[in-house]
Image: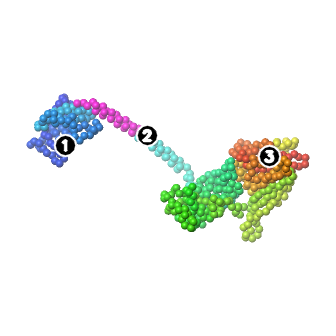
Amino acid sequence: MASNSDGLFTSQYYSLMGSLACQDGLGLRKFGKESKNRAGCQGIIKRETKGDKAFVATGTNLSLQFFPASWQGEQRQTPSREYVDLEREAGKVYLKAPMILNGVCVIWKGWIDLQRLDGMGCLEFDEERAQQEDALARHASEEARRRTREFEDRDRSHREEMELRSRLRCRREAAPARRAEPMLDLEVVPERSLGNEQWEFTLGMPLAQAVAILQKHRRIIKNVQVLYSEQSPLSHDLILNLTQDGIKLLFDAFNQRLKVIEVYDLTKVKLKYCGVHFNSQAIAPTIEQIDQSFGATHPGVYNSAEQLFHLNFRGLSFSFQLDSWTEAPKYEPNFAHGLASLQIPHGATVKRMYIYSGNSLQDTKAPVMPLSCFLGNVYAESVDILRDGTGPSGLRLRLLAAGCGPGLLADSKMRVFERSVYFGDSCQDVLSMLGSPHKVFYKSEDKMKIHSPSPHKQVPSKCNDYFFNYFTLGVDILFDANTHKVKKFVLHTNYPGHYNFNIYHRCEFKIPIAIKKENADGQTETCTTYSKWDNIQELLGHPVEKPVVLHRSSSPNNTNPFGSTFCFGLQRMIFEVMQNNHIASVTLYGPPRPGAHLKTAELP
């Protein structure tokens, strides 16, 4: 029940007396002569255009609705007789209105005399609505608590994140400031090179020289990957991938010289041509910029399978990826004079750049080694193994060197000459034929001596044999410590995946192997650097003796990540074979001395 200024109501019925005024939204019509002067009337009944009845009685206001409130899920413009009944009794209107009075759900029921403007009414407790209101209140309370918990969780996470950021900021401020890694600023020379004042990757450069450049400038050029095919190293190019700088160096799988320079991410490097940048942080390599920097060229080539458009210059190619264009290109296969046409959208940017030798990227080959890459060294173009009646007798080397002699044009030509060295040659003979070695290595012990049938194999030697290492020839020559004469040649193939990879240049050897067949004279077959051991066994027509397993490592505590190799003895030669059947090295032995046994299993 409602309370007033005199205390609690003691009865469910009370009388409402006073004047009734009707407000229609346009003005106030008054009933009764004294209505204007009744400032202290006991009660006023007001009817608004919305149909609400308002009573003021001893300090209590009641708003009566002619139809159910919105909580009942129903909104009607015309009240039903249940709420406003004008026909029940003449001259009276019976009203029913639900309400919440001081937090209590009640229903007001009563009547009003339309002539005297007084009436009677009572309040009843509305239990059904009270239950619904209680459920709504509980739901609202739970929702409020849930939102409060979510807010507290977000606030806690935010504070923890801010604290973490503050700690990281303090650490960065306390630590010495790191300088941002500078981008490489490289000069592009079509059909030749990519580099700067300190270093240069040149087409035709040997693999070892490119690796030496990367090792020397390892503080600037970082994160280099070596990519090759482990099972078929000759079927795919050998790649040096400079991941931090977006550059790939593609080397020919056979001669291991630089064939293609690819820039696959132009956002990681600055590029210039004739000293003027066409790609940098401030200059985008658009097709308009390429045209301005390099001039006109033949119409581009469209590769529909790869959705690539190639704009080709001699020794230089730019690729545009079509799926990155905002506009669809218009390709006309027969445009004019037998040429195709592709309308490139304005502002299309280069995705890749290639430097190569010749006019076609697909048909390019690694050029011959440029004179600038010799650096005073001598390289072997080919190495032929000489044979006698029993086996190999020596080497005939076809050598390459930069021209030397008087005059300004002395170094403009490449010299080609032949030299031969044999088993039993003295150290002075080898020096006069091949020049000084890159390194001299003294053997500490012969680990394969245990496989020798010599009865004196356990007798320690007072002197150590020594090697002449010719890295650019791919050849090692072993000299006897007592006689200082040649007793062994070692030829290296420099296959990736071998323990000695990139120490030697590839030796392009040709070895004649004697083949014996029934009812036929002896004939020879040629084994080359690219022969596989299973093919050699097929040529021999009989299985070779079981191999010796060779485990290489830099120290007893280190392991070889490339695995072991297998050594097969054949005709005074030992073939070191990798697990993919390719030949890693060939060791040649001279004829045995009188009274001595051949050490067929001896290795360096």
Residue at the left extreme? 33
The residues bearing labels 1 and 2 have C-alpha atoms spaced at a distance of 49 Å
Quarter of the image where one finds residue 212: bottom right
Locate residue 598 relative to residue 42 in the image: left or right.
right
Q: Nearer the viewer, mark 1 or mark 2?
A: 1
* Nearer to me, 547 or 116: 547
Marks 3,2: beta carbons within 8 A: no
* Nearer to me, 546 or 9: 546
Q: What amino acid is labelled 2 in the image?
A: Asp
For label 1, the SS is loop
Q: Which residue is depicted at the point 77% across and 47% down?
A: 538
Is 206 a magenta residue? no
The residues bearing labels 1 and 3 have C-alpha atoms spaced at a distance of 118 Å
Is 88 located above or below residue 450 in the figure? above
Q: Which residue is depicted at the point 41% across and 39% down?
A: 150
What numbered label is drawn on residue 48? 1
Residue located beneath label 3 in the image: 541
Is 97 located above or below residue 258 in the figure? above
On the image, the x and y values in percent for residue 535 come to 75, 48
* Nearer to me, 585 or 296: 296
Magenta region, residue range: 124-150
Q: What amino acid is labelled 3 in the image?
A: Gly
Mark 3: few/some/many CA within 10 Å (<14, 14-19, 20+)? few
Residue located beneath label 2 in the image: 153
Quarter of the image where one finds residue 220: bottom right
Locate residue 96 relative to residue 487 in the image: left or right.
left
Locate residue 104 relative to residue 548 in the image: left or right.
left
Q: Quarter of the image containing the N terminus?
A: top left
Dot 1 or dot 3: first in sequence order is 1
Q: Nearer the viewer, mark 3 or mark 2?
A: 3
